[in-house]
Image: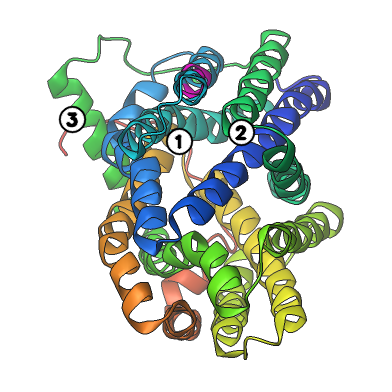
Amino acid sequence: MKENWKKKFLLIWVGQFVSLISSSAVNFAIIIWLSIAHKSAEVLAFSAIAGMLPAAIIGPFAGVYIDRWDRKKTMMLADSFVAACTLVMSISFYMGYESLALIYLMLGLRSVGSAFHMPAMQAAIPMIAPESELLRIAGINQTIQSISAIAGPALGALAISFMSIGNVLLLDIAGAIIAVGSLLLVHIPNPQLAEKAKASFAQVWNDLRGGFFEIMRNKGLMWLFLFSTVVTFCILPIAVLFPLLTLNHFHGGKWEMSVIEMMWGVGMLVGGGMIGIFKPSFSKVVLINCTYIVLGCSLGLSGYLPGSAFYIFVGLTIIGGIAAAVYNACFMTVLQEEVRPELMGRVFSLYFSIAIIPTVLGLLGTGWAADAFGVNRLFIALGGIIVLIGICSFFSRSLVKLGIGKKKSKVPFSDEGL
């Protein structure tokens, strides 16, 4: 019975809110430091690769263990590990050792912690709240992330202006402590597993195949994953290069960089708030397809603008943030509705890896392409591809019908025979 779920979410949200703001501030401070110190698209691309590739590689295997472990403890240990990696970076800056190699290494290890935390958090939500409230919760979660995306860059820009990067990193550690403390106050149930055997390599591989089969057995879900993977492949390079577009194309500085980050957060706040308040009753898949088109147009037009049109760029960034928030909330809700609880962790991890690994490999050429052809031209090209994907998504009948008029299967799952 999911009793007192609102109280549980309030406690979790408080901790996650503080942690997200501190992490957002620190992440943006690192971006500012790297952008100003090196002024290289390749450095930003390599830092993004270091922050995503380890999680993408171990993600599917992490998901298998998340489905077997206590999800609350998994989140707490993951938060603590990420904080420890941040502490190592802070100490290195205090000692005057500002090595890019060490930064990449610590970003990679933080990525390992995130590989366990994010899927565990998403997999825990359906175990706490009623299914009828999942979309509203996704909207509220998106709102919290949006507020942190607004306040974080402002705090990060302010902090890096008055403190050394080593001191700024300590904010992330404080946020992690608060997040872990809030989790200590709640009980998060775990799904009943049909099998309690130890996770041997053979069993882990079999469980991993079970998560993949969960995706493949649902044709609509399979198409959703495919289109989302292509869109993610286009979006992440753009996200990495946003600071350089502000610096090089629109001739901005620290303040303009923080304004763009905050306006993206404003857009996400509006989009998440709309989902959380109005809780749309029509197809979430149709909303996802529409957000592809809106997001692609906003990004493509941002690259097409002349360098003097910074304020139009700000407006397009807000629109892009709204589309991204609606997409994230709807996508997560579709997965939570379509996937059975005992497979949730591995499916979320599989999606992350399927979407991120090709993107990370693509980032290897992003820095070169941006430096050779211009950041703005990369925005135009990738934005156009996203629009095309949004249009094509409407022609997949199984995707458009996903989740309409049917409930999630309750038949017990067995890995036998896969």
**Up-down relation of residue 61 to residue 252 (above or below):** above
Q: Check disc 2: other Cα within 10 Å, few if <14, some if 14-19, many if 20+.
A: many
Q: Position of residue 218 (x, y in %)?
A: 37, 56
Numbered range of the magenta stretch: 82-87
Which label is found at residue 294?
none
Which residue lies under the disc numbered 1?
Answer: 344
Q: Position of residue 36 (x, y in %)?
A: 53, 55
- Residue 60 sits in quarter: top left
Q: Position of residue 30 (x, y in %)?
A: 54, 42
Image side of residue 299 versus residue 8, left or right: left
**Residue 286 versus residue 261: which sits nearer the camera?**
261
Tell me the residue at 37%/28% (across/down): 109
- Give the amino acid type for the residue marked by disc 1 in the picture: Met
- Do callouts 1 and 2 mark residues in contact (Cβ within 8 Å)? yes
**Separation of residues labelled 1 and 2 (CA atoms):** 9 Å
Q: Would residue 137 be seen by someone viewing this image from the given angle?
A: no
Q: Does the magenta stretch mainly form a helix, a strand or a loop?
A: helix
Give the SS element for disc 1.
helix
Tell me the residue at 44%/85% (across/down): 377
Which label is found at residue 126?
2
**Residue 344 versus residue 184: which sits nearer the camera?**
184
Indicate which disc, 3 or 2, sits on the residue closer to the N terminus.
2
Indicate which disc, 1 or 3, sits on the residue closer to the N terminus.
3
**Up-down relation of residue 278 to residue 214 (above or below):** below
Tell me the residue at 30%/36% (across/down): 101
**Separation of residues labelled 3 and 2 (CA atoms):** 25 Å
Q: Is residue 220 magenta?
A: no
**Separation of residues labelled 1 and 3 (CA atoms):** 16 Å
Which residue lies under the disc numbered 3?
Answer: 205
Indicate which disc, 1 or 2, sits on the residue closer to the N terminus.
2
